[in-house]
Image: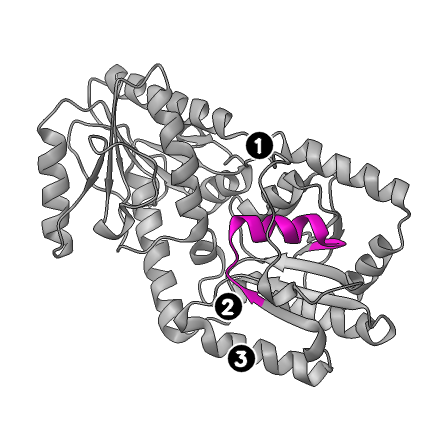
């Protein structure tokens, strides 16, 4: 099987997507069913993908039309059996079947939320392109059953065109050294409540700040650690969160840790007393998988797809219910060591079910199904099972 993977982006790449490529691409290279793998990326994405130079190709700078023309020219030079575009974008490669992946649900579910105007407009554009790609591609890889249900229910796409492939998670090996984040080096006996992810309205961090405000003053040893980068367009939003913390009187016990390295994240997972997931829109949340792999005691919103991933390895609360979240936090903090060890083991067991090796194998299977279906239809595109 000769496969071309086209990472069609404007040059940017989220931490979750970078990790997906870093973990998956070397495994795809080793799959026995893949004879040749060509990976196309913007120039900004060349570094850190662990691929040899013959596999990784970056396109020249230029406008969108020139870039697409260059990609097509390169792919047409050698036989290619299938194209995989993981970014929910579409290029018509004629008689070569195309698979797209849908892995970002914020633009599809809550494009506006409390986003700045320009970000809301960008989300609207992302949703349009994702829908266009999903309707035109020969097959879709969905990263969760929740995404699959959305595509079927909202966009009327035939479920037989969609394959579910979960992302994997790298299990802690117990050997790699952990690093205490600089902002936490002075912590002694504090109890850490931890959450992580990009700072943006879809994260639902208001839930956690409000809940923390209800419990902190009677529990001064608590510290709330919020890790994750803040994009330039979200600085105003973060300022509003900081103002909320000031109003609640919890500023001195809220630590904005910023972007952390993997070893720093591992330290936080392993040293927190509770990990909290408040997000309003996820597809396959890598942070959730990492928290479970580290055996965190987890509290999560009931918002889909969180129960699909946590299963019985989390305590749930209704979104936007600060009282329920505060009670859940105090409940898990009251557990004795025996119960904490039991729930922690449940989380590790659940996390171990998400494997990068399985992700690679199932991705190859979806590509193979696409090739076979395309050939069965005489090399023509199947009819789209979608309402107009």
Q: Which residues are magenta?
A: 257-275
**Residue lying at 48% horizontally and 25% vertically, measured from the top left:** 357
Give residue 193's position: percent from left, percent from top: 72, 60
Element at label 1:
loop
**Residue lying at 40% horizontally and 39% vertically, measured from the top left:** 22
Instruction: Using a 10 Å C-alpha cutoff, classify the residue at mark 3 as few (fewer than 14 neighbours), some (14 to 19) or many (20 or more).
Output: few
Gap between marks 2 and 3 measured at Cα:
17 Å
Gap between marks 2 and 1 measured at Cα:
30 Å
Q: Disc number at residue 75?
A: none
For disc 1, the marked residue is: 354
Q: Is residue 278 visible?
A: no
Q: Is residue 91 left or right of residue 216?
A: left
Point out the tag, 2 or 1, that comes first from the N-terminus: 2
Asked if the residues shown at circle 2 and circle 3 are in contact, with their CB atoms under 8 angstroms apart, the answer is no
Q: Quadrant of residue 338?
A: top right
Q: Is residue 44 visible?
A: yes
Element at label 3:
helix
Residue ranking furthest to the bottom: 247
Question: Where 168 falls versus 375 (above or below)?
Answer: below
For disc 3, the marked residue is: 239
Question: Is residue 259 one of those drawn in magenta?
Answer: yes
For disc 2, the marked residue is: 113
């Amino acid at each position: 099987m000769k496969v071309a993977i086209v990472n069609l982006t404007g040059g940017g790449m989220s931490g979750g997507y970078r990790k997906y490529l870093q973990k998956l691409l070397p495994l795809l290279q080793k799959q026995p069913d893949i004879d040749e793998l060509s990976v196309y990326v913007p120039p900004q994405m060349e570094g850190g993908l662990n691929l040899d130079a013959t596999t990784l190709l970056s396109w020249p700078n230029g406008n969108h039309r020139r870039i697409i023309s260059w990609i097509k020219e390169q792919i047409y030079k050698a036989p290619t059996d299938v194209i995989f575009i993981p970014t929910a974008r579409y290029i018509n490669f004629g008689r070569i079947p195309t698979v797209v992946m849908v892995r970002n649900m914020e633009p599809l579910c809550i494009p506006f939320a409390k986003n700045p105007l320009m970000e809301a407009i960008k989300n609207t554009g992302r949703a349009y392109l994702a829908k266009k790609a999903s309707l035109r591609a020969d097959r879709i890889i969905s990263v969760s059953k929740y995404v699959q249900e959305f595509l079927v229910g909202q966009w009327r796409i035939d479920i037989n065109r969609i394959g579910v492939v979960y992302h994997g998670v790298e299990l802690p090996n117990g050997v790699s050294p952990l690093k205490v984040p600089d902002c936490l080096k002075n912590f002694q006996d504090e109890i850490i409540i931890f959450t992580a992810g990009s700072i943006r309205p879809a994260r639902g961090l208001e839930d956690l700040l409000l809940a923390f405000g209800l419990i902190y003053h009677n529990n001064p040893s608590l510290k709330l650690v919020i890790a994750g980068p803040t994009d330039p367009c979200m600085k105003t939003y973060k300022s509003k969160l900081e103002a909320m913390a000031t109003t609640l009187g919890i500023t001195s016990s809220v630590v904005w840790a910023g972007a952390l390295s993997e070893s720093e994240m591992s330290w936080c997972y392993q040293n927190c007393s509770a990990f909290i997931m408040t997000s309003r829109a996820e597809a396959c949340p890598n942070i959730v998988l990492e928290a479970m792999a580290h055996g965190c005691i987890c509290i999560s919103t009931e918002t889909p797809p969180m129960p699909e991933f946590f299963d019985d390895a989390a305590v749930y609360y209704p979104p936007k219910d600060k009282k329920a979240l505060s009670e859940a936090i105090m409940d898990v903090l009251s557990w004795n060591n025996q119960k904490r060890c039991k729930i922690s083991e449940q989380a590790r067991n659940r996390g171990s079910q998400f494997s990068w090796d399985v992700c690679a194998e199932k991705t190859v299977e979806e590509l193979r199904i696409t090739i076979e279906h395309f050939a069965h239809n005489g090399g023509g595109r199947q009819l789209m099972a979608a309402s107009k």
